[in-house]
Amino acid sequence: MNRHKFILQTLLGLFLTCFADNCFASCSSMGINVFPRTRTISNNSIFIIEGYLSSQSVITNLNKGNAIYLSSGKDTIPLTVIKTLKSQFRLTQAILKPSSKLISGKNYTLHIDNLDEYEKADFLSDSINWTVSDITDNQKPVWSKLPSYSSKGMIFYGCGPEVFVKFCACISDNAPVVVYARVKNLKANSISDYYLNPDSCSVQLGHGMCAGEFEFEQGQAYEATFSLMDASGNISTETQPVKFISPTEKDQSQQDEKTVNCNCQTQKIIAENSAIWIIFSLVAVGLLVLLVLRKRSK
């Protein structure tokens, strides 16, 4: 009996080991992402470096074991870490600022020292470079539509679920923008925060199968506040809290029944039409005033 039990435990252990290895293989083991990825930056640009899974140690070790800097020919500009954030699921990011002003017209390449060969291949520092414009950007980004709840969902994969809560949001800024999200678990009274990349008309909280910014307890009450930061470090004011209930296994579809269609193009058209009507109204009032004055002069 004990022998049979031992064999079963051994087989189960081998199965779980193989399953875990296959799951791990379906997710990459490292990764470094950089913001912004535009070809041109302002002369007061900031940078965000994010590490995934094993590359998180690179982020926490910046300017310790891993020096980070910009180079242009023989000139180098060290980058200073001004803030580090750790997600709830395998991501860590650092916000960095040049230690001296970038020179307009120059092309700078980003470097991180002491990466291993796999991280170097993933990082591809030769392709991460920018040309500096002569613009100093001090304009704060603006919400053209404040974040509002849209939908939630839970999609199951072989090695774990993708969990998301989607918010409609429209952003107005000439530079690339990230969204700073502060998420509060109202039951546990705990807070987590992270910078997110929005898409064209929404921002999404949660995580994928392999990694992500926020983890949720199923069916719990949360609230989120948002603010914008552009590639020059300009920050908008924080929004009012938006409450939501986190997804459960019942939400195993792409979207829930109360999905709101996020359409920033509609908002843009409405804003443009409103501006046209305002101009038309002013012109009409002006003409009316001229007619009245002309009649009085007669």
Image (tube, grey):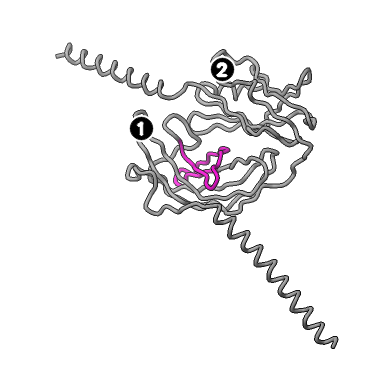
User: Is 191 part of what is drawn in magenta?
Assistant: yes
Q: Quadrant of residue 180?
A: top right
Q: Which numbered disc flags the more N-terminal residue, 1 or 2?
A: 2
Q: Is residue 236 visible?
A: no
Q: Tell me which residue sits at (28%, 18%) in the image.
A: 15
Report the quarter where the N terminus lies. Answer: top left
For label 2, the residue is 121
User: Is 253 part of what is drawn in magenta?
Assistant: no
Q: Type of residue at label 1?
A: Tyr
Q: Tell me which residue sits at (60%, 40%) in the image.
A: 178
Q: Residue 194 bears which disc, if any?
A: none
Q: Is residue 83 above or below residue 57?
A: below
Q: Which residues are magenta?
A: 182-207
Q: Is 72 or 32 nearer to us in this picture?
A: 72
Residue 256 located left or right of residue 96 = left
* Rendered location of residue 253, percent (x, y): 35, 44
Q: Quadrant of residue 116?
A: top right
| CA distance for labels 1 and 2 | 28 Å
Neighbor class of circle 1 (other Cα within 10 Å; few <14, some 14-19, many 20+) is few
Query: What main secondary structure does the magenta stretch of the protein show?
Result: strand
Neighbor class of circle 2 (other Cα within 10 Å; few <14, some 14-19, many 20+) is few
Q: Is residue 243 above or below residue 273?
A: above
* Rendered location of residue 260, percent (x, y): 45, 54
Number of numbered discs on residues? 2
Residue 119 located left or right of residue 13 = right
* Rendered location of residue 282, percent (x, y): 72, 70
- Residue placed furthest toward the top: 3
Q: Secondary structure at mark 2?
A: helix
Q: Quadrant of residue 41?
A: top right
Q: Secondary structure at mark 1?
A: strand
Q: Type of residue at label 2?
A: Ala
For label 1, the residue is 157
